[in-house]
Image (spheres, rainbow, N blue to C red):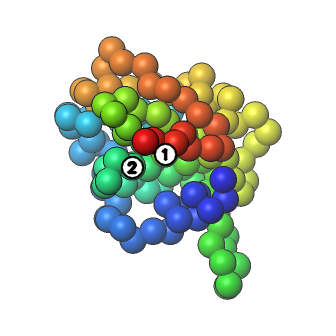
Amino acid sequence: MIAASIASGCSSRNQSVDVNALRNGDAPYYFVGRSFDGFRITHVYSYQRGVANIIYGSCKARSDEGCPPPLELQHRLCHGRVTVVIYAGQGARAGTPRRAAQALRPLSKAAQGEKPDVAIDQAPFCH
């Protein structure tokens, strides 16, 4: 869990975009609102190589390592199906992943009428 959160939260693989830019997109994006458990959306990374991220809140990294943000919604496209992997990190309350899974809703046009698969703390294998 921590490795995925650190990598996506601090990665410079692409620039963070405004969440509104995804609303009319052709790719499926899901979110839990503009804020969740008191944490606002801080970073949005569009799909690259089948993975996208919506990050809520920030964390305080130590000088020698990164840190997992309070909430990360990692989107993974595999064979035309999206799985939203929910990671809870530094500052998250107990039960955050379960509540986030229940609050998950479509953000983009492509997600309307579709329910994603949901995983907590572990991304599915895509072969």
**Depth check: 40 or 114 in front?**
114
Residue at the extreme bottom of the image, as rendered: 63
Q: Is 40 on the left-hand or right-hand side of 96?
A: left
The residue drawn where x is 54% and y is 29% is 118
Q: Is 78 on the left-hand or right-hand side of 40?
A: left
Q: Position of residue 9 (x, y in %)?
A: 52, 62
- The amino acid type found where label 1 is placed reads Gln
Q: Is 39 on the left-hand or right-hand side of 114?
A: right
Task: Identify the secondary structure beneath mark 2.
Answer: strand
Q: Position of residue 80 (x, y in %)?
A: 31, 31
> Could you tell me if residue 39 is visible in this image?
no
Label 1 packing within 10 angstroms: few (<14), some (14-19), many (20+): many
- Residue bearing the label numbered 2: 51
Image mark for residue 113 = none
Residue at the extreme top of the image, as rendered: 113
The residue drawn where x is 39% and y is 71% is 12
> Could you tell me if residue 11 is visible in this image?
yes
Q: Position of residue 116 (x, y in %)?
A: 44, 25
Examine the image and state in which quarter residue 81 appears.
Answer: top left
- Residue bearing the label numbered 1: 74
Mark 2 and mark 1 residues within 8 Å of each other at the beta carbon: yes
Q: Is 117 on the left-hand or right-hand side of 18?
A: right
Distance (Cα) linking label 2 and label 1: 7 Å
**Depth check: 15 or 116 in front?**
116
- The amino acid type found where label 2 is placed reads Val
The residue drawn where x is 59% and y is 40% is 86
